[in-house]
Amino acid sequence: MYKKILLAVDGSDHSLRAAKEAVKIAKGSDDSQITIVFVADHDNAKNEVLHSGSSAELDFQRRKKLQPVEEAVASENIKYRVEILHGTPGPTIVDFANKEAFDMLVIGSRGLNSLQEMVLGSVSHKVVKRANCPVLIVK
Amino acid sequence: MLEKIKKDWFSNVKGDALAGLVVALALIPEAIAFSIIAGVDPMVGLYASFLIAVIIAFVGGRPAMISGATGAMALLMVPLVRDYGVEYLFAATVLTGVIQILFGVFKVAKVMKFIPRAVMIGFVNALAILIFMAQVPHFLGINTMTYIFVAVTLAIVYIVPRFFKAVPAPLIALVLLTAAAIYGGFELRTVGDLGTITQSLPTFLIPSVPFNFETFMIVLPFSLALAIVGLLESLLTANIVDDMTGTSSDKNKESRGQGIANFVTGFFGGMAGCAMIGQAIINVKSGGRTRLSSLLAGVFLMFLIIVLGEMVVQIPMPVLVGIMIMVSIGTFDWSSFTYLKKAPITDSIVMVATVSIVVYTHDLSQGVIAGVILSAIFFVAKISKIKVQKKLLEATHYQVQGQLFFASVDDFLDKFDFSVEDKDIVIDFTDAHIWDDSGVGAVDRVVLKFRENANRVTVIGLDTGSEKLVDQLAIFKSEHAKLPTH
């Protein structure tokens, strides 16, 4: 079944819902592992650095954002690791997913309308189009 | 060694080459606009951006960071150029370099951590406001066509990137609108009205200023301000690039590198510069990762100027104004408004004070220094609150809570009731710490004053640090000690 699962999160409620689905899938196999990946968006770098005292503090803030997701996975006793990457979310997730062979990628969808999608760009769309593994989009 | 050179320079050639080109294209309008802010020929800013980008590629501490002529530095130079001329600016640039090299040698970068984030936020906001204010005379009340060109420029720089990202949008605006202005024959002021473009490489020159103490004293305050602001923006940018690339960098080497770059630039007819937040972000986002990206950005910039020089003088001013408005909007920290609501009131005051002082004095360094001093005062005021609780057990118990040091001594002394006679008194320092000799002196005063009325005083609960200080400085441990009479 699906053993190597990549869970792409941004710390939002949508990504928490995605985490719960990823857990369900992981439970289907005995030695499955979830890789939680979070992309620190390059567009926010200036703002985040300016508003944090040090790089250690910034790192801690990001980990705190992932706390609910980590808990959701850990509470079910599923093996997991956390990767914090830097870049533009869509392409960075795709590159990471295609570099290591994952059995499945799970990602939340923000549920944007078509105007927002045009302006903001849909991360999950980009991932579906370009990732080489099956992708589960959680609404 | 070879291995390191390969990693520092040639581990990402394709990404670096592309990013270098993108940055060079984005640098052209900025270097010209910052020259105009400073009140010098566009070549002064273009040479500076070329030289600094190239030199920093070799001597900087943060690979993939882009340095050049910047708005923050240009704004500081305005009075110097206006009152004394461009040759004094070159001299100031050399001296700025010397000061920054010293900053690097003496590891001043470490002091950065004493600059509170409220001051840094105030710094970028003030910078954004000043860049915007510098544009106003170039578009306000000139003619309708000027307004239209500014508006079209803004539309292009904000809408085009949504659909097309390969070429920086400001450059698209620059090319399209310059062409439109030339063929349409509109009445617009151009870069050529404000200066000339020389299509040649910079040459070595010694700033033609009298070499005496008077010159030094004229230039020194400007150089100091430039050195401080340049270092501040460079280290902030380095932190941003560190974060974007998930790597670390050598901040002292960067400071020294900025110094070397400015020192050399002053001898080649360029103005002092520093790291550029916006350009560094563009570089990393476009794929730049090593020193090669910075080198190529500089080289491409110079190449483009030599090739396109004639076109540059025909760039309409309103297009540059539009691009600078975009730069100022991008520089401003828009989350400041939520910050003002959420942050402690003292931090908000520091932020607003920093911005106000800069906007009033037009000098970023003064705002930063005032902001740092103000937050230091707030900090001292905050931690100098000391509590003393009095409890009547079999002995009179005074429970001290807080930090005992020069600023809290008066408060501390007021908390005791010295009218008692012949009592057992215990002063408990379990929840307190004594920091300096004023603190120890205060304990001395209290103990000895109680003893004057034949009370028996015991001091308990000193932590190790306080104990050590008391052992060294206090006199109350001797039974015969008397209160100093002064």
Image (cartoon, coloured by chain):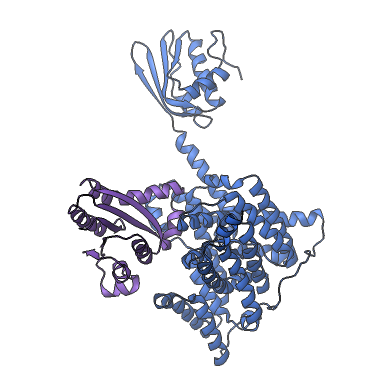
Chain colours: A purple, B blue
Residue at the spot x=35%, y=49% of the render?
Answer: A63
Indicate left or right for B124 with B207 as reference. Answer: left
- Answer whether residue B229 is visible to the viewer in this image: no
Indicate left or right for B197 with B449 as reference. Answer: right
Q: Position of residue B93 (x, y in %)?
A: 70, 60
Query: Is B395 drawn above or below residue B360 in the view shown?
Result: above
Q: Position of residue B117 (x, y in %)?
A: 48, 50
Question: Based on the displayed image, in which of its 4 quarters is residue B359 positioned?
Answer: bottom right
Q: Position of residue B41 (x, y in %)?
A: 68, 73
How many numbered marks are there? 0
Question: Based on the displayed image, in which of its 4 quarters is residue B382 positioned?
Answer: top left
Residue B46 or B133: which is nearer the viewer?
A: B46
- Answer whether residue B178 is visible to the viewer in this image: yes
Residue at the spot x=40%, y=49% of the render?
Answer: A59
Query: Is A122 drawn above or below residue B1 in the view shown?
Result: below
Q: Position of residue B215 (x, y in %)?
A: 78, 57
Indicate left or right for B242 with A126 as reference. Answer: right
Indicate left or right for B197 with A58 as reference. Answer: right
Residue at the spot x=20%, y=50% of the render?
Answer: A30
Residue B7 or B219: which is nearer the viewer?
A: B7
Residue at the spot x=58%, y=79% of the render?
Answer: B317
Residue B187 or A54: which is nearer the viewer?
A: A54
Quadrant occupied by the C terminus of chain B: top right
